[in-house]
Image: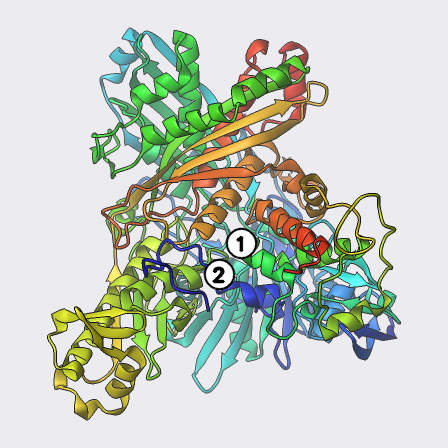
Amino acid sequence: MTPPPQDGRWVGTALARKEDRRLLTGRGRFTGDMTRAGLLHAAFVRSPFPAAAVRAIDTAVAARAPGVAAVFTAADLGDPYLLATLDRDEFVPTAMPLLGGGQARFAGEPVAVVLAGDAYLAEDAAELVAVDWAPSPAVASLDGAQAGDAPQVHQGTAGNCLVDLLMFDDERLGGIFADAAAVVGGEFASARVAAMPLEGRACLAEWDDRDDQLVLHVSTQVPHQVRSGVAQALGIPERTVRVIAPDVGGGFGLKCVVGREEVVVAAAALRLRRPVRWTEDRQENLAASFHGHEQRYRVRAAFDAGGRILGLDADIDCDIGAYSAYPFTCAVEPLMAASELPGIYKVPAYRARGRGIATHKAPTAPYRGVSRPQLVLVMERLMEKAARALRLDPLRVRRLNMIGPGEFPYTGVNGITYDEGSYAESLDLAERRAAEQGWPAERDRLRAGGLAAGIGYACFSERTAYGTPTMSQRRMRMTPGYDTASVRMDPTGEVIVTTGTCAHGQGHETTFAQIVADRLGVHPDQVRLRQGDTDLASYGWGTFASRSVVIGGGAAARAADQVAGQLRAAAAHLLEAGAADVELRGGAARIRGDARAAIPLPEIARVVHFQAHALPEAVRYGLEARASYDPPGTFSNACHAALVAIDPGTGQVRVLRYLVVEDCGVVINPLIVDGQVRGGVAQGIAAALFERICYDDGQPVSTTLMDYLVPTAAELCPVEVIHLETPSRFSESGAKGMGEGGMIGAPGCVLNAVNDALAGTGVSFDHIPVLPGEISAALAGGEAG
Amino acid sequence: MTGTHRVRLRVNGAGHELMVEARRTLADMLRHDLGYTGTNVGCEHGICGACTVHLDGSPVRSCLVFGVQADGAEVRTVEALADGDKLSDLQQAFRDHHALQCGFCTPGFLMLAEAYFAERGLPPPAAPGAARAGAARSTPPAAAGPGGGAGQAGAGPEPSEAEIRELVASNLCRCTGYQPIVAAILATARARLAGGGG
């Protein structure tokens, strides 16, 4: 057992994780590890065409194949679908059929499922399902989809536009741009990427006669939304479905939406009354799950001669693929981008239009960062461009425009109120640290040695812990935000916490225990978090958007405070003292100022449960409470800095040094916070330099890890993390969310460093990933760009 | 239909005999036929390394090996590393350095590192029972390099961070950015060289 910290507070302690032991010894329980007697394996028949009508499906041969128990098509299941919708006129809802019945809208779309007693036999039989396809022309790019005569992915959607939101406008902008000392801008773009958790999607569904309930084990970030999706798609009450997320091997947003395959597996288990398991393979994962983050920004910004931004005008188009994902809809990327583009900069006049455009490609889900990596990239490139145009220092231009100390809370042109942060301090510290470590001299040395080398910065904040006050502005039919926790002490003094959040690598079993332990005066080893089970926890929204420690942890803190009150009241009675004089510390209830008057908490728990009659009515009957938390959201912030070197022959970029100064308010567990930052930076560097899902005329061609380049340790460098701590007033613990910041800052930071390295060439890049061929061409003669 | 074949092997010291199809991968045989689910499968095409196990002492991607190829072999999986509830020094270093988040890739990295340590003549300080049996047929330690000084005989010089980073580049992790994995393996190597264990 870890000894208690000196000040007695577990929050802030670098406690090694509770989760680690089982995962290190191979005793974790991932969905694919589970088996059942009589288990059936699902294999999906998928469209080989990006766009095709399904004229007929003949399943007879497959159904007779060895080991096959059943084959289902859409018609067999009654044409069920998932429908995600916004209550906005500018939004076109698109039902996502569980199995494509009449039409396939992307290569990889499932049209039938085979269930067999062996996974290999299921795949064999899937090849025997005969589909009569009628392929038709596909649209596979934003330009293609928006052309006047483009085929429509969904009928009746001109230009394939599924959502078109003019979020802000300002009639002064015409004059502002006409009079500005400098107008900078251009087209900024990010390629489509895959979240690529090491564990793909997986589920196991089984019917439980005793509870009259379908139990669906699924690798998900959002168990309650999976339950709602299954219930809505299959037309059954939510009570009849129990969703359990066991250990989840990463999500990054891919698993915060409901996959149609999960619902098909549930439907098959319901129909056959047999357990059914599906384990996505990597090819399915890369080609046919959900992608993210394919966006194009056409932006102009006006600056005065001193470098102050005067106006910002943006048209943002997101290639959302074939369908709106449930429950977020395809508006999640354009809404986020258009509402939050100004970021930390004081933009006086703003216009933004965000659109979601359908293509014949896999649908998209809210990938880690959701539009913030792009909008930070755009703003940080604009600051650099303005500085260049006006011959100013780019960091000075940032300082001039960012929300400064003493200006918080600041309400921006976008109507968003930014709570206290350390925007200027983090930039100052990053610049100082880079100088102390000799980055500028190292850049000079690298350049003298024949390499191109550059230093880049990115400054940003990110709204985290979106509660319903904020989420409701999106007008989603299903609006996430709040969460609910319960805290219960058992008769031996052990504590059980339930939450609707659902960790998949973030270590909530540890951090939630630290939060609750402090409230109850117990050791974190005595606190057990139960999560990811819809029968155990109250309705909750799972883990995404950097929400869990603030919202779920806040709810747990509130519930724990109530239990602490119950403990103090019982102790006051037993110690014959006033409840206000009782404190909970070191596993006991103590009277302040009286070192001898103490009762161990297990003793109180024993009396409350086993000798209720010895207590007054008000403190009898359990040590248990339930609380909810629903904050508006709180802004974390950071400054990233990178030093890169480029081999002029190959154009290969090496990130040599990377520094993050971050402020997520009160740090619950520094080990875990640093881990989240570093992992996010790795994903951000990946997006900046390596990862790209490619299509060739609608055919996915990045379907293996030889084609989709996830960086290894050889492509990454150590990341130094420095913490500032500006507590949030919109958070029970003062903590701010921080699961995405690493990913949000890194693309813009790395791109700025690459452009700094190319500064002498006259070429600069505004898209990611920026690839070796483009860079070597730029270095060879400036013809690219 | 492909035929089935009799396979006899030892896994972490325990003997097994089973009939498998020729096409069945070692990963599927270990996980689904023999119940060693600690080995995870991340890509099924040999890139991610999550399924790394030791086959007669050498690290292999068990998704790229057929079960029948393990006939007569000694296989070692992540389940062999701890001594009951006591983590090995390497596992403890992973925990101390927060070298795992979701934990799905972790067994592969642990087995990768232990194979490297075996090659370098750096076995765990006090090998637990199951591991001893599993290591019975492992590759003999590599010849001692120059230098090395104190520490275990034949262990060679202390590995550099760059060497460990290159080793770690064999496998994929999506959560950590690799830095703590490199640190945990390096710390374990140093401790084993110094002879002090974890």
Q: Is residue A143 above or below residue A721?
A: above
Task: Identify which residue is drawn at 84% across, 69% down.
Answer: B136
Task: Identify which residue is drawn at 70% across, 54% down.
Answer: B194
**Disc 1 to disc 2: CB gap under 8 Å:** yes
Residue A194 x/y as whole percent: 57, 44
Colouring scheme applied when the structure was drawn = rainbow
Q: Is residue A513 above or below residue A735?
A: below
Q: Nearer the viewer, residue A743 or A155?
A: A743
Task: Identify which residue is drawn at 22% across, 17% down.
Answer: A172
> Where, by quadrant of the figure, is residue A769 drawn?
top right
Residue A145 can be seen, yes or no: no
Q: CA distance from mark 1 to mark 2?
A: 8 Å
The residue most toward the front is B150
Residue A675 can be seen, yes or no: yes
Q: Report the amino acid beneath label 2.
A: Arg
- Please rate how many residues cluster around mark 1, counting C-alpha atoms within 10 Å: few if below 14, some from 14 to 19, many from 20: many
- Give the secondary structure at mark 1: loop
Residue A611 x/y as whole percent: 23, 91
Q: Which residue is mark 2?
A: A17
* Image mark for residue B98: 1
